Image (tube, rainbow, N blue to C red):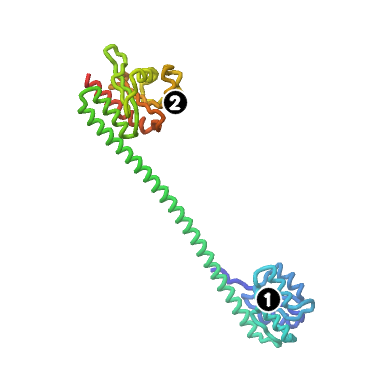
Amino acid sequence: MSNPKVASVLVVDDEPEICQLLVDALSAADLHVRTAASGKEAIDLARTHRPDILVTDLLLGDCTGLDVIDSLRRGSADIPAVVITGKGGPAAMSEASRRHPVELMTKPINLQRLREAIREELSRQARRRCWVGRHQRLRHLARTVNKERKTIHRHLNTTCADLTAAYRTLSMQLSVQQIVLGYQNDLISAKTDDDVFRSFFRLFVRKSGQVHGVALVCDAEAKLRVVGRFGVPQPDNLRFCEALSRPVIDALLANPTCALIDAQQKAEQFDKSIRRYLTGLSILAVPLMPAPGEMIGLVALYRKGEQPFTDDDMALAEMISHPTAAAIRRND
């Protein structure tokens, strides 16, 4: 168990007998009494040993007790004071009252009343310290709870965002899977290469909007030749499609994987006759390989200045390239 707090009392009086009388009357196990014989001595002593309560005579040799009260209260918190006077007139008593003393007493001093006044003030201070401590603990607890609430809220927001993103990704994957399944059903009923490529083209139009395309399949001499031209509102002429396809064929023969090609950036690879049409033109090249290392055809989808092909378009092309190649092989 911790020891009870020992309160500090500063007694100020220029009469040694009064100082000693007050020391004898107030000294107790829980009260430590210091004395000062002048205002200056009291102020100096209070700087090193701040009192919990001040007991001062109104008239001192070098100043007044009110001067001492004012000086101590300027340097720290509001120090409670008991003012004692034996000669003060109405004006002095009124001035003392403005300092809101704990007690304003006249001589001869009622020592019992003085002790009670000091005890009541010290008890009030103890209650106030308890209240302040409880209030600070509650504020600390409230800050801690609020901080934890914000952390939990932030985690919930992050979790919700992650779940939303995961749900969106899963929904997109399911949507793509449904598209691919629908496309494969179309391939089952496709009787000719033209049916296959028409389904291929319609798939991209439904998914991402206006697009043009050219389809090539290996002939008997293993040369890729144009077998279909597609476009909205109408396909481009054969000469343009053949000129556009040549660099695409070279690129896929060197690396037979789906690729996005910016035709404008690689204009020097295309025939001079079509370079003026390459501004803003993007190409999605899709090799048709029923088995690894065996390319039997390709599809070059292209857009003329519209929204360029995206990674999602590339992913879809990679998913349907093999079943498309298998359908072409089946129709041979």
Residue 266 sits in quarter:
top left
Residue 103 sits in quarter:
bottom right
Residue 241 in percent (x, y) is at 35, 20
Mark 2, secondary structure of its residue: loop
Which of these two is toward me, 88 or 33? 88
Crowding at mark 1 (Cα within 10 Å: few <14, some 14-19, many 20+)? many
Q: Which residue has dot 2 on it? A: 279
Q: Amino acid at mark 1?
A: Leu
Residue 180 in percent (x, y) is at 28, 33
Which of these two is toward me, 253 or 186? 186
Q: Amino acid at mark 2?
A: Thr
Total labels drawn: 2
Which of these two is toward me, 129 or 143? 143
Residue 124 in percent (x, y) is at 58, 76
Which residue sits furthest right? 62
Up the image or down, 139 lies above or below 60; here it is above
Crowding at mark 2 (Cα within 10 Å: few <14, some 14-19, many 20+)? some
Mark 1, secondary structure of its residue: strand
Q: Earlier in the sequence, mark 1 or mark 2?
A: 1
User: Left or right: 292 with respect to 70?
Assistant: left
The residue shown at (20%, 24%) is 191
User: Left or right: 22 with respect to 164?
Assistant: right
Residue 305 in percent (x, y) is at 41, 30
Q: Nearer the viewer, mark 1 or mark 2?
A: 2
The residue shown at (46%, 24%) is 265
The residue shown at (49%, 61%) is 142
Which residue sits furthest bottom? 108
One can see residue 318 in this view: no
Q: Which residue has dot 1 on it? A: 54
Residue 12 sits in quarter:
bottom right
